[in-house]
Image (cartoon, rainbow, N blue to C red):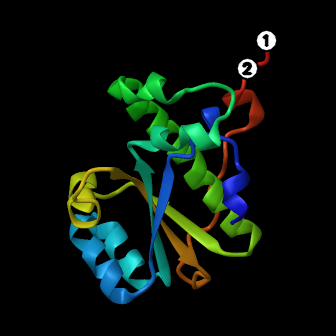
């Protein structure tokens, strides 16, 4: 519930989430994963498919009241696609921040066959996979230490 308050452009909210809680549900995901991520996912208590609703604009009349923005996207697949991807990525990041605020470990992953995940979980095509997140309390002996992050001077320019 915490993640829903993160902003998206035009309040589009294209992010959708499939929570794979059971081992059987996670096993459906394994054939589409690279080997390095498969075992992590098998051991995770929960894996989330962060997906995007490719017809998010159908909800704009109730979610964005400033003007009728649905036609901006309904007839423009390239704009709708990039908007769904960008904003569902933001929403996935909000999920990570919300989970971390609750003390959970998060393992976001992009090492998977998107078409395979879509075929298995989203055969009608309306939702499409963006990325995956393993959630839970990790075993301290198997969690990688935190890697360094770029300093401000490297990552930012102030004009």
Say whether residue 35 is left or right of residue 50.
left
Left or right for 62, reference 159: left
Label placed on residue 159:
1
**Image mark for residue 10:** none
Q: Residue at x 43, y 85 (%)?
A: 43
* Residue at 43% from the left image edge and 49% from the top image edge: 52
Q: Quadrant of residue 85?
A: top left
Q: CA distance from mark 2 to mark 1?
A: 6 Å
Q: Residue drawn 24% across and 55% down?
A: 124
Task: Place residue 27 in its image quadrant.
Answer: bottom left
Give the structural element (helix, strand or loop) at label 2.
Answer: loop
Image quadrant where one finds the C terminus: top right
Count the numbered circles shown. 2
Q: Where does label 2 land, which residue?
A: 157
- Up the image or down, 55 lies above or below 141; here it is above
Q: Is residue 21 above or below residue 116?
A: below
Q: Position of residue 113 (x, y in %)?
A: 25, 56
Binning the other alpha carbons within 10 Å of mark 1 as few (below 14), some (14 to 19) or many (20 upward) gives: few
Q: Nearer the viewer, residue 102 or 70?
A: 70
Residue 61 x %, y %: 57, 37
Please provide percent x and percent y for residue 39: 35, 78
Secondary element type, mark 1: loop
Q: Is residue 18 above or below residue 68?
A: below
Quarter of the image with the N terminus is bottom right
Q: Residues within 10 Å of mark 2 (few under 14, many from 20)?
A: few
Q: Quadrant of residue 10?
A: top right
Callout 2–callout 1 Cβ contact below 8 Å: yes
Q: Is residue 9 left or right of residue 41?
A: right
In the image, farthest residue toward the bottom: 23
């Amino acid at each position: 519930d915490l993640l829903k308050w993160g902003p998206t452009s035009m309040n589009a909210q294209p992010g959708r989430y499939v929570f794979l809680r059971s081992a059987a549900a996670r096993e459906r995901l394994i054939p589409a994963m690279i080997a390095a991520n498969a075992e992590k996912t098998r051991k995770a208590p929960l894996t989330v498919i962060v997906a995007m609703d490719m017809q998010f604009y159908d909800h704009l009349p109730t979610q964005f009241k400033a003007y009728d923005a649905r036609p901006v996207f309904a007839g423009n697949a390239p704009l709708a696609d990039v908007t769904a991807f960008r904003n569902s990525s933001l929403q996935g990041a909000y999920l990570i921040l919300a989970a971390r605020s609750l003390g959970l470990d998060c393992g976001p992953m992009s090492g998977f066959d998107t078409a395979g995940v879509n075929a298995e979980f989203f055969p009608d095509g309306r939702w499409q996979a963006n990325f995956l997140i393993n959630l839970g309390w990790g075993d301290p002996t198997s969690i990688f230490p935190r890697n360094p992050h770029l300093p401000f001077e490297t990552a930012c320019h102030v004009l």
